[in-house]
Image (spheres, rainbow, N blue to C red):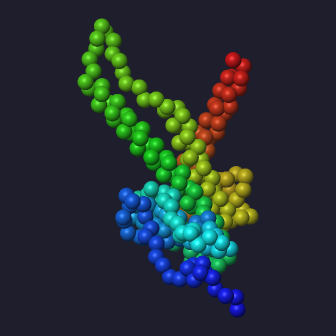
């Protein structure tokens, strides 16, 4: 038996990690594996945790600590976190869907979609605050020489383009999740193929079929809007090349 080195004694011993940023002393609500790493879901944030052996598997440096890093500044107190990642963790669990379902992949996709949704949420809050400030500033303005200087909100075009891109990414992640359930039945026609499948298998009056019928226009709107923005960007780039 190989002699145990001091680093082996250190790494094999018990310990504890106080997970959380300095401004987040909220309680732990859940834990799950995302992208092959343990993540701790607290009330006010999501944290990636790595043990020293994950960073230094050959045990060459005893100074390497266990680490934790906040990857999302929203936790279980946020509705979007509960309605996406935390719901997915329960719905996709092997106890419900069996060991053959790609649970890890479904969780990874759910987390990617959540990150895009949170960016959209923050953008919406910033724009709403800027609009409110602009509206408030108008109340104190007066017309001078028959002219009025109105406030400006900059970068709206770029913000809208980014918002639509993030929305499209979230829709794409959602579609990838559906392919985990129906890998041979949904394809190039995206959610329309899923709608056709539901209508054929469960009937037009089934709850799932009716839900898809209502969701399809929204999903198409997101994709078409993103495509329009992409075309506009390419046209602008082409025009700039001729200037």
Q: Quick check: 188 left or right of 220?
A: right
Residue farthest to the bottom?
1
* Residue at the image point whose x is 61% and y is 35% from the top: 229
Along the line of sight, which residue is nearer the eye, 179 or 186? 179
Q: Quadrant of the N terminus?
A: bottom right
* Residue at the image point whose x is 65% and y is 74% from the top: 59
Q: Quadrant of residue 50?
A: bottom right
Q: Quadrant of residue 234?
A: top right
Q: Quick check: 78 left or right of 185?
A: left
Up the image or down, 164 lies above or below 108; here it is above
Q: Position of residue 6 (x, y in %)?
A: 59, 81
* Residue at the image point whose x is 45% and y is 56% from the top: 73
Q: Quick check: 139 left or right of 211?
A: left
Along the line of sight, which residue is nearer the eye, 156 or 5? 5
Along the line of sight, which residue is nearer the eye, 53 or 78? 53
Q: Quick check: 185 left or right of 156?
A: right
Q: Quadrant of the C terminus?
A: top right
Q: Position of residue 88 (x, y in %)?
A: 53, 67
Up the image or down, 146 lies above or below 2; here it is above
């Amino acid at each position: 038996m190989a002699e145990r080195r001091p680093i082996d004694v250190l790494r094999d011993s018990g310990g504890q990690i106080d997970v959380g940023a300095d401004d987040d002393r909220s309680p732990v609500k859940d834990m799950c594996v995302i992208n092959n790493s343990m993540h701790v879901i607290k009330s006010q944030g999501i944290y990636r945790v790595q043990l020293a052996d994950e960073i230094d598997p050959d045990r060459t440096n005893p100074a390497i600590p266990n680490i934790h890093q906040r990857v999302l500044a929203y936790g279980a107190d946020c509705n979007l976190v509960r309605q996406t990642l935390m719901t997915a963790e329960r719905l996709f669990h092997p106890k419900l869907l069996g060991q053959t379902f790609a649970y890890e992949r479904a969780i990874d996709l759910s987390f990617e979609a959540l990150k895009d949704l949170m960016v959209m949420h923050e953008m919406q809050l910033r724009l709403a605050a800027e609009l409110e400030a602009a509206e408030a500033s108008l109340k104190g303005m007066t017309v001078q020489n028959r002219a009025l200087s109105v406030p400006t909100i900059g970068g709206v075009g770029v913000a809208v383009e980014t918002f639509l891109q993030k929305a499209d990414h979230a829709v794409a992640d959602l579609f990838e999740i559906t392919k985990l359930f129906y890998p041979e039945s949904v394809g190039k026609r995206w959610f329309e193929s899923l709608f056709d499948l539901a209508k054929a298998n469960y009937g037009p009056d089934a709850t799932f079929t009716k839900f898809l019928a209502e969701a399809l226009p929204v999903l198409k709107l997101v994709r078409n809007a993103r495509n329009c923005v992409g075309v506009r960007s390419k046209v602008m780039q082409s025009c700039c090349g001729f200037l």
